[in-house]
Image: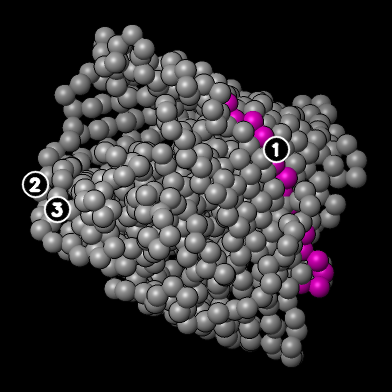
Amino acid sequence: MSGFKRGKAAWILSVMVPTALASAIAQAQEADTARTLDGVTVIAERATTATKTDTPLTETPQAISVVTSALFTDRGARNLQETLRYSAGVTADAWGLDTRGDASTIRGLDPVQYVDGMRRLYNFSPMARPEVYGLERVEVLRGPSSVLYGAGATGGIINAMSKRPNFQSAGEVGLQLGNFDRRQLQGDITGELGDSGNVAGRLVGVVRDSGMQTDEVDDDRIYIAPSITWRGERSNLTVLASYQHDETASSQQFLPVAATLKAPPGRRLDPSTFLGDKDFDTLDARVASATVLFDHAFNDVVTWRSNLRYIDSKTDFREIFPDTYSNPEFPFIDADGRVLNRLTYGVKPDNRILTADNSLQFDFATGSFQHLLLAGLDYTDFREESSTFSGVTTPIDIYDPVSTGGTIPEYTPLPDQRNTQTGLYVQDQIRYADRVSFVLGARRDHVRSETQGMDDQTDNETTYRLGVIGDIGANFSPYISYTESFLPVLGQDVYGNPFQPMRGHQVETGVKWQPSRNALFTAAIYKITETNRQTNDPDNVLNVVQTGEIQSKGIELEGAYVFDNDFTVTASISHSEAEVTRSNLDWEVGRRLNDTPQDLASVWLAKGFQVGDDMTLRAGLGGRYVGSTVSAGPTTSLRTPSYTLADALLELQMTDWVLSLNVTNLFDKEYFAPCRYFGDCFSGNTRTVVGTVTYRF
């Protein structure tokens, strides 16, 4: 399915981009949508990801941002990574337009993806991406977080929270139309079931038939998510289910640097260029999940929480892509510089994931100290059966890309994988004089990795966290914290020694200021160290050793303010220096991490105007800046330029109807995110225009 050509979008919204970003403030929002209470605009103030308890942000000694569905919908987000485009320290579209997954980085490092507080992704196998229409909010916890969540990366956690049933009846149905032939029908209905007042249900659904920026690539989806909640006098039970089927292909075509960033005049490829084969390339992904969330308060002191989820995911991914790696400077096989060899890759992962998390919460006092003590046991069981192929296929003329002769090879089974983790954790949140909060935590993990045909690998790790935050007056709350993480590394060296887990630790200090309930500003300074990174063995070219170390240090400023006249401002600015501090490769030491921008900034403005008794016009405008990246090898280095993009919103709200128009990359700027020294470029997102008509009842 082909989309409209560049520059021929159905709608063009002409507005000016602010020339300067708001100074040193940013967005740090919380669990619910901003709302009106007694005539005062309020920003919600609490989150659960950082502590697994319902804790105010101003009592949490670690950087956390929460983006509500209302906010990321206003900004035109179409997938999970796009919801984070305005969050401090987050490179949301780390690999540009990429249907293979939601690849973001936090503070220059990789995060782990969770849904409803339970881990969703365990490796790089492609899996259907979360549907953002089914989310209430997205919480971003920055920095290591193994004390509560076990094995994980040093970047932090992206925790997407699903929509839950509401006892207040509400519903909507919407139709979206956009460029690239986008057509989407969506609906969301919730309310009380029966007359008991104890049961509520919700049903969320999406059907999409769409093309994409990349020629010949579809973006089709079916998503349905029913849920039900029962509430008793002291107990609550929620069951969430979902089924999703995506039909697309790899939107990234790994276009050669020689024909994009470094192309001579008149030879630069269009970002829509497709170099695969429409009868070969596919990303067919199906995922079904069931989640049970239960809590019971035995009394005013002790509460039990039990969360359980099962995921069944099946994906068929095939792609043909150009061979830019054999000769990055001139990858062509003809003298005219038009024809490239092509490679093939395919994988069929079948994943089954069982997650359980049980905890007891104790709320009690000892003298002047109020304790919120959490003790828990969690378990995960990840299993994967997979098959793959790779090889070569026919070449292609990239300036007249007609694919012929591509055949699907036979898949070869890969060794079955099973990873289990059992963790015991304890955390005490201590509040003194209702002004100072201490957070102390420790965890012990037992991780077992099984690979068919190999010896099992077992890792036992203990991690810690501690932090303190206090209100020193005028609603200023400075804090300091220390957190740790670990991540098992599968396999062994050539001498039979198993690899040790990668370990990370972070020291962070900052301040949170909430001058009123409709404003929140935060500042953070941090230093993250990641050790046991794999590097090449200088004494044995066939071996890999773990002497590598990475450090990431930086500063982040973030804030949000909702004025009484329906005027919202959010902004962020961050600077991160992530570099290799230890390696067996001398050329690598002291260099910044490849493909990682150091500077990020954003601002979003939205204003409502009353244009009648039952009509409101809302307009929004945002700007995003992403700094340049460097990709360096032993002898070469490539810099990808920075870019600044604008997004816009125009919305008309009536009693039962909402008409909205979202435009991302308003001025259709062409950019790359990023290009790499071994020969390929990742295309950025061109202008996207989506109009939505919604009827609410």
The residue under label 2 is: 410
* Pointer 2 or 3: first along the chain: 3
Could you tell me if the residues under marks 1 and 3 are in contact, i.e. CB atoms within 8 Å? no
- Vertical comparison of 294 with 398: above or below: above
Q: Which x, y percent locates residue 642?
A: 57, 50
Q: Secondary structure at mark 1?
A: strand
What numbered label is drawn on residue 555? Answer: 1
Q: Which x, y percent locates residue 533?
A: 44, 22
**Is 243 placed left or right of 652 in the picture?**
left
- Residue at figure coordinates x 43%, y 50% from the top left: 262
Q: Which segment did they paint magenta?
A: 549-566
Which amino acid, by three-letter code, is at mark 3? Thr
Q: Quadrant of residue 131?
A: bottom left
* Pointer 1 or 3: first along the chain: 3
Which amino acid, by three-letter code, is at mark 2? Glu
Q: Which x, y percent locates residue 433?
A: 85, 34
Which amino acid, by three-letter code, is at mark 1? Ile
Could you tell me if the residues under marks 2 and 1 are in contact, i.e. CB atoms within 8 Å? no
* Pointer 2 or 1: first along the chain: 2
Name the one closer to the observer, 223 or 299: 223
The residue under label 3 is: 394
Q: Residues within 10 Å of mark 3 (few under 14, many from 20)?
A: some
Q: Secondary structure at mark 3?
A: strand
Nearer mark to the viewer, of 1 and 3: 3
